[in-house]
Every structure is written in C-alpha cells, then in structure tokens.
Image (cartoon, rainbow, N blue to C red):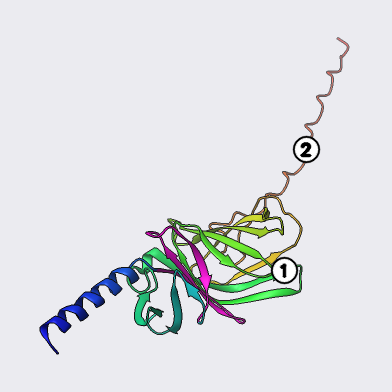
Amino acid sequence: MTLYALRLAALFLSVASAATAEIKFAGILVTTEKTMFRLKDDAAGTAAAWVQVGQTFGGYAILRFDERRDLLTLLKDGAQSEVRLKDSKVQPEASIEISGVATFDGDKSVDVSRATLIVGEENSFPLKEGVVCLITPTRLPDGNIRYRLAFERTEADGETERLSVLTIIQRPGDPLGLNLSSGKNPANEVRSSAVPPRNPSPPISPPPESEKAPRAQPLSKTKP
C-alpha cells in the first residue's frame, strides 16, 4: 500500500471514529419480550431513543449487541464502529442495575430481567401500551436506594397523562414489584417491604386507667 493510501485510510478511520464518538449508549432494558438500547447524540441535538438490533438511530444501523462486554456494533456508510454502555464496569458507583415485575391492572405484566439506571438522573423506560416509567435512583447514607418512579402515558392527541408517582426505598439488588392501575393515582409515599424498619419501636398501649384516690372521711365530733 502506498503512503498516500495509508494516509487516506488513517483519515477515513479518524473521521469515522470522531463521528461515532457522538453516539452514546445510555441505557439497556431487557424484558421477556425484547431487548432495547437507549441511544443519544447530544452534539447533533437528536432526541434520545430506544432502539433494537436491526433498527437505526441518527443514520447508524444497529448490527449486534455483545452482552458480555455491553458493546453495540453500529454501521454507517459501510463502516462499522462500536459504542460501550455508559459507565458500565467503569464507574459502578455511578450506575445501578435493577430487575422486577411491573403489573398493569392486575393481569398484564412486564418482567424486567435487567435495566440500567444512572444514579441521580431521571431514567426513562418504555413499558407496555404506551406507558413510560421515569426512575430516579438516589443512594442513601444507610446504604439503601431510594427510587422515585413516575408513570406516564402519551395519548392519541399527543398529550402526556401522568398516571402515578411513588417512592420506594429498598436494598440494592432487591427486585422491584410494582402494580399499576390504568386510572390516575395521586402522589404517594411507599416503603418496600424488602427493607425492615430500623430500630422498630414496640406498639404503645394506652396507659392503664389510674385508680381513684379514696375520699377523705369527715372528722366525727366527739362529745366532751
């Protein structure tokens, strides 16, 4: 290969690498039905989207996923490139993996075997029938994780309906179990049963009824 050809190949590779570097692999969702990947391109101003193998994002075709390395292979203009899951195995304290079951109206459920969350950020996950779950995890000083969850659904007219908002506190690694009704639910605070209360206090029973003091007897007069 001539020097000119080598320079041309190096230039092509550097351009392709620079372009691919803008694509970020920001999340993964694995259910019994599908595996989805959340991609974003902040430089291009492209809205983040959930895609599957065989689909495209920002002109890149999603070729395959290496589960062992959390690596996606992309294809654009005949050139392949790779992008790794954000924070995966690099900064484990910055991310959390969860699993669990989300049940809708008591019978329709989604089994989630793996979902990655970025700590301190709102993570968006598509579930079922247009319902999106927004999860924000926060690490607490006692080692537990607080999850703030908001469930939304986009209607046919484009309006977003908020179905429910709740908070769950539990140990890292414990599966989530959620039951969502199709009706609106006011915001509420829930504590997962997986976390035993710290320093439980015994129930307080009402104090016994105090005994009445005997009445003083009047002094009887005696005759002199």
Q: Nearer the viewer, mark 1 or mark 2?
A: 1
Circle 2 residue: 211
| In the foreground, 210 or 67 | 67
- Dividing the picture into quarters, in which one does residue 26 lie? bottom left
How many residues crowd mark 1 within 10 Å: few (<14), some (14–19), many (20+)?
some
- Which residues make up the magenta segment? 24-53
The verdict on residue 29 being magenta is yes
> Which amino acid type corresponds to the residue marked 1 in the rendered image?
Phe
Q: Position of residue 93 (x, y in %)?
A: 37, 65
| In the foreground, 7 or 55 | 7
Q: Position of residue 167 (x, y in %)?
A: 59, 56
Quarter of the image for the N terminus: give it.
bottom left
In the depicted structure, whether residue 198 falls above or below residue 77: above
- Dividing the picture into quarters, in which one does residue 67 lie? bottom left
Number of numbered discs overlaid on the protein picture: 2
- Element assignment for label 1: strand
Which residue is farthest bottom?
1
Q: Who's the residue at 76% across and 58% down the image?
A: 183
Q: Where is residue 27 in the image (x, y as percent from the top left)?
A: 46, 69
Q: Is residue 112 left or right of residue 173?
A: right
Q: Who's the residue at 74% across and 54% down the image?
A: 184
Q: Who's the residue at 66% across and 50% down the image?
A: 187
> Which amino acid type corresponds to the residue marked 2 in the rendered image?
Glu
Circle 1 residue: 104
How many residues crowd mark 2 within 10 Å: few (<14), some (14–19), many (20+)?
few
- Distance from disc 1 to disc 2, alpha carbons, whole Å, reads 56 Å
* Predominant SS of the magenta segment: strand
Q: Position of residue 114 (x, y in %)?
A: 52, 76
- Element assignment for label 2: loop
